[in-house]
Amino acid sequence: MSEKAIGVFDSGLGGLTAVKELIKVLPQENIIYFGDTARVPYGNRSRETISKYAEQDAGFLLSKGVKMIIAACGTVSSNAVGLADTLTVPFTGVIVPTAAAAANATRNGKIGVIGTSATVNSGAYKKEILLRNDKIKVYQQDCPLFVSLVESGFISENDDIVKLVVERYLSAMKKEGIDTLILGCTHFPIISKAISNYLGKDVTLIDSGRETALYAANLLGNNHILNTANKMGTCRYYVSDTVESFRNTAEIFLDKSVEGEVSHISIEQVEL
Ligand code: DGL
């Protein structure tokens, strides 16, 4: 049994959608979350910059003595591909668990992938799906405006702006007849109702946070580091921008008010 925390990081607050799922799957685990709110968004940056930021983020979590690291961010997971090799603890990003779930879920062999521009341009999801089944057709679309919509509070499935942007981004893959869609960005589960209303109930939405939480539970078990303590775990949050801005937005992603302590850190000054 290990009471050490699981370290989770993201470019900002979106990774809290994965924390929400982790709490459901592994309620007894302690979690330390780092959100790089001073440098968000990562999704329109270069692979070099994303990789450098990811190393700093993971380095900060290691300095807190975590037993495992999860990159909850689609952009980091698809671009900082060498990160796992630099770490001394078990690690997962969101790509492998999510691609595996989508490849299992499709019935007609047509999968859509949506994410930030950096995620879609990396081709990481497509590569991972085709590794499992090279007959599957993968349709990709970057949806940067979804991130802005969610961060600005435009999340209702009845909002005309949300409906318009959903249609603009997803009409091509809807025409192709996808039956499975990967929500390949932390923010997208928040507008999943609008997405599902547009695509229809026969299209299965795969939530990367949910799949990664399930995968993390297996990884902890295989490494014999599950926390078997008979009590609820705690969450501790760190951000690189202000604590106030975290508190204002975090609820959208967590779907409840923030319970754990929140602190500011200067990520540029973390010693690796
Ligand atoms: N967390 C990012 C992702 O999942 C979205 C926000 C950003 O662009 O940094 O790709």
Image (cartoon, rainbow, N blue to C red):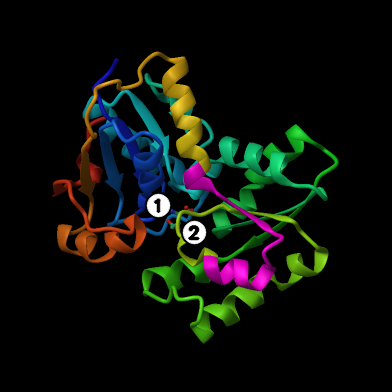
Q: What amino acid type is highlighted by mark number 1?
A: Thr
Percent x, y of residue 56: 32, 38
Q: In the orientation shown, which residue stands out farthest toward the right?
A: 135
The image quadrant in which ligand 1 is located: bottom left
What span is in magenta? 193-210
Asked if disc 1 and disc 2 are in contact, CB closer than 8 Å, the reply is yes
Residue 272 figure quarter: top left
Q: CA distance from mark 1 to mark 2?
A: 8 Å
Residue named by callout 1: 17
- Determine the residue positioned at 14% across, 48% down: 263
Residue named by callout 2: 189
Percent x, y of residue 253: 36, 58
- Determine the residue positioned at 59% across, 82% down: 164
Percent x, y of residue 214: 49, 35
Q: Residues within 10 Å of mark 1 (few under 14, many from 20)?
A: many
Which quarter of the rendering shows the N terminus?
top left
Query: Which disc is residue 184 wearing?
Result: none
Q: Is residue 76 left or right of residue 176?
A: left
Q: What amino acid type is highlighted by mark number 2?
A: Pro
Question: Label 1's element?
Answer: helix
Percent x, y of residue 176: 82, 64
Q: Is residue 258 left or right of residue 122?
A: left
- 208 in magenta: yes
User: In the rendered view, would you say 103 is above or below 174?
Assistant: above
Of labels 1 and 2, earlier in sequence is 1
- Determine the residue positioned at 85% across, 41% down: 135
